[in-house]
């Protein structure tokens, strides 16, 4: 029983990280119609930037802030200078971000080296909680909490604010949104930055949980894909539910059938794709 | 004779005579170029002709390589058996994978192809006892074909040349056939083709299986070329590289991907001597090509030619 509870908690905390990534990826796609293949790279960069700032300042909060700021700025520059030039061309944009995937991965390898590194956890969350026979690191609870808070904040932003209304309008019909006075170029920059922000938060939180290493970018990108394929593109609810499902399956898969790890995640994806090609909550 | 045919004929003659004037090092490079030219052309059948942008075309290349490697190391060394199995395996994988991928459209198609290829990478990387894991499988010797050893650079070059030329011949027949025309029609407008009574799904399915088959041919040649197979054969970097070859050269043609393969491999060969940051360069080429030359080198050349004619 203990094994199941601990693995479930591990799965949920990982699922929250995947949710952060998938929510950004999904939001960017929903509004801008861009499949950002460099999304995992933003996560990786967030982790590495956090690591460096932590080394100098010993403050987790400062590291988080710096990483988020750095990655978001980079995303704004990327969107303004490059992506903007070819809006409306899905494949070209995806290929463009594919280029960034390689550039960022290679530069990160150059700067931070090839060895896996782990961010030190924040001081208040280094201990483990004990409940009966179950011992569980408190940091994992922090990750779960951050995921839930972000989820609620995103929901509130989307459903209850003026910006959210603009985002929803952009998802439904970008041209109409422009017609009724939404400044879509600025909205696009904002949405891309928001996605990058979420990825960077994920990177720092994940960096202390799983470590940062070359290849982590692509690993999380793929799992975020699976989340989106299961949950449906452009759906916040889909990203949340999908994140939990994939987090749990991945974790139990790795624990029970270590050699088939990827298989256990991709099998349900294939099944869902066969039944509902647009995902559980996605719209066609 | 049209200028295009003349250029083709000259290129063919040059390729035939290449061993006479190239050192064995450059002959090796040329062999690799031929293999990747075929790999890129097979992807272009999907991307350029049918309009299906697969990010996971390495799956078939890698399965071809691994099948030959595993068989020749563990079971038999007979060339024909290995080659046939090496062709059958990627074709079967294509049969299975594309039942799934073709359920998806547009962005979903990009994601699902990338994800499926990564499953195979995961198996190659994780299943140490079977695939050798990260270390891969070294020591695959080049076989004897009809009592004739092709271990040397020159015989292997000719075998590759024959294999690639035969494949190119098949591919050029395919793209000029009614099937090929229908694929281009589907690329331009699926709806219109459906209205005209074409079973769009069936055409796409056939195209993706053919593309998988020819990628498998390239995979078989490459495993004999290197004498080694590893997870890199199934990696996203390989996927990215071959996709870039297609786009850089010019999608929607057979010459374009071959040209792209030549350019990328030449660049890799020369730049790797000066810098370890090849991936960064690859990424930069990606960005530059997608931004400024989406129709590739061939598109730019054609544009020039047309502009020249218009001026004259």
Image: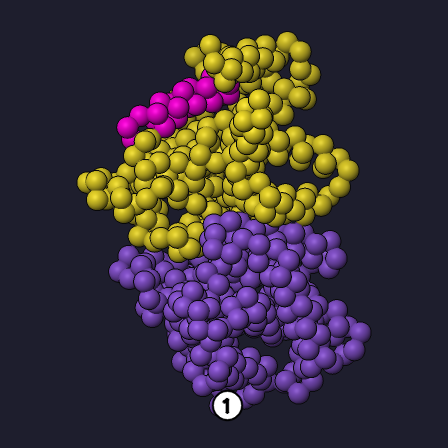
Chain colours: A purple, B yellow
User: In the image, A82: left or right of B107?
Assistant: right
Q: Is B96 on the left-hand or right-hand side of B194?
A: right
Please give the name of the residue rendered at 32% of the width and 44% of the height, measured from the top-left corner.
Answer: B189
* Residue A275 % position (x, y): 26, 60
Farthest left residue in view: B197
Task: Please rate how many residues cluster around mark 1, counting C-alpha atoms within 10 Å: few if below 14, some from 14 to 19, many from 20.
Answer: few
Residue that numbered label 1 is attached to: A131
**Which quadrant of the structure image shows residue A64?**
bottom right
Q: Nearer the viewer, residue B278 or B293?
A: B293
Q: Position of residue A114 (x, y in %)?
A: 69, 55
Q: Which residues are magenta?
A: B160-179
Q: Residue at x 60, y 23 (%)?
A: B30
Is residue A216 something one can see in this rendering?
Answer: no
- Give the SS element for disc 1: strand
**Which of the 4 image quadrants contains residue A174?**
bottom left
Residue A119 belongs to magenta span = no
Above or below B217: residue A245:
below
Percent position of residue B113, x then y: 42, 49
Residue at the (44%, 34%) spot, across then down: B252
Q: Quadrant of the C terminus of chain B?
A: top right
């Amino acid at each position: 029983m203990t094994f199941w509870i601990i693995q479930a908690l591990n799965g949920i905390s990982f699922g929250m990280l995947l949710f952060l990534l998938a929510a950004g990826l999904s939001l960017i796609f929903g509004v801008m119609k861009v499949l950002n293949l460099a999304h995992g790279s933003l996560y990786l960069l967030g982790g590495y930037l956090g690591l460096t700032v932590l080394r100098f300042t010993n403050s987790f909060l400062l590291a988080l802030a710096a990483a988020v700021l750095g990655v978001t700025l980079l995303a704004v520059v990327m969107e303004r200078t490059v992506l903007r030039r070819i809006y409306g061309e899905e494949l070209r944009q995806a290929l463009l971000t594919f280029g960034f995937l390689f550039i960022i991965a290679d530069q990160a390898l150059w700067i931070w080296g090839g060895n896996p590194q782990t961010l030190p956890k924040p001081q208040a969350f280094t201990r483990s909680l004990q409940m009966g026979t179950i011992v569980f690191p408190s940091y994992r609870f922090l990750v779960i909490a951050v995921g839930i808070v972000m989820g609620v904040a995103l929901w509130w932003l989307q459903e209850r604010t003026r910006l959210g209304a603009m985002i929803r309008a952009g998802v439904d019909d970008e041209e109409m949104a422009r017609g009724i006075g939404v400044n879509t170029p600025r909205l696009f920059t904002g949405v891309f930055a928001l996605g990058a922000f979420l990825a960077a938060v994920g990177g720092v939180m994940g960096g202390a949980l799983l470590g940062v290493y070359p290849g982590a970018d692509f690993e999380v990108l793929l799992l975020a894909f699976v989340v989106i394929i299961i949950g449906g593109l452009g759906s916040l609810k889909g990203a949340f539910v999908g994140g939990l499902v994939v987090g749990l399956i991945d974790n139990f898969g790795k624990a029970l059938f270590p050699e088939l790890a990827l298989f256990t995640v991709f099998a349900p994806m294939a099944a869902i794709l066969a039944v509902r090609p647009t995902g559980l909550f996605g719209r066609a | 004779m049209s200028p295009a045919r003349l250029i083709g004929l000259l290129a063919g003659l040059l390729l035939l005579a290449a061993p006479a004037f190239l050192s064995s090092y450059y002959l090796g490079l040329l062999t690799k170029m031929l293999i990747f030219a075929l790999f890129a052309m097979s992807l272009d059948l999907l991307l350029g002709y049918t309009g299906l942008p697969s990010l996971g075309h390495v799956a078939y290349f890698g399965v071809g390589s691994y099948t030959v490697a595993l068989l020749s190391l563990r079971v038999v060394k007979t060339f024909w058996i290995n080659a046939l199995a090496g062709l059958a395996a990627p074709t079967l994988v294509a049969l299975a994978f594309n039942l799934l991928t073709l359920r998806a459209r547009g962005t979903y198609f990009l994601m699902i192809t990338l994800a499926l290829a990564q499953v195979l990478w995961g198996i190659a990387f994780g299943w140490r006892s079977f695939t050798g894991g990260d270390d891969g499988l070294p020591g695959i010797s080049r076989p004897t074909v009809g009592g004739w050893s092709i271990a040397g650079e020159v015989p292997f070059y000719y075998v590759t040349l024959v294999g690639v030329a035969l494949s190119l011949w098949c591919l050029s027949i395919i793209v000029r056939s009614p099937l090929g025309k229908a694929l281009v029609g589907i690329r331009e407008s699926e709806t219109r083709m459906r209205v005209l009574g074409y079973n769009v799904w069936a055409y796409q399915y056939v195209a993706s299986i053919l593309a998988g088959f020819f990628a498998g041919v390239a995979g078989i040649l490459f495993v004999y070329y290197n004498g080694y197979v590893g997870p890199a054969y199934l990696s996203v970097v390989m996927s990215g590289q071959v996709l870039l070859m297609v786009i850089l050269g010019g999608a929607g043609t057979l010459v374009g991907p071959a040209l792209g393969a030549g350019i990328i491999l030449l660049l890799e060969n020369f730049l790797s001597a000066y810098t370890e940051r090849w991936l960064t360069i690859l990424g930069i080429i990606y960005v530059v090509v997608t931004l400024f030359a989406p129709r590739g080198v061939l598109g730019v050349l054609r544009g020039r030619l047309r502009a020249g004619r218009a001026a004259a």
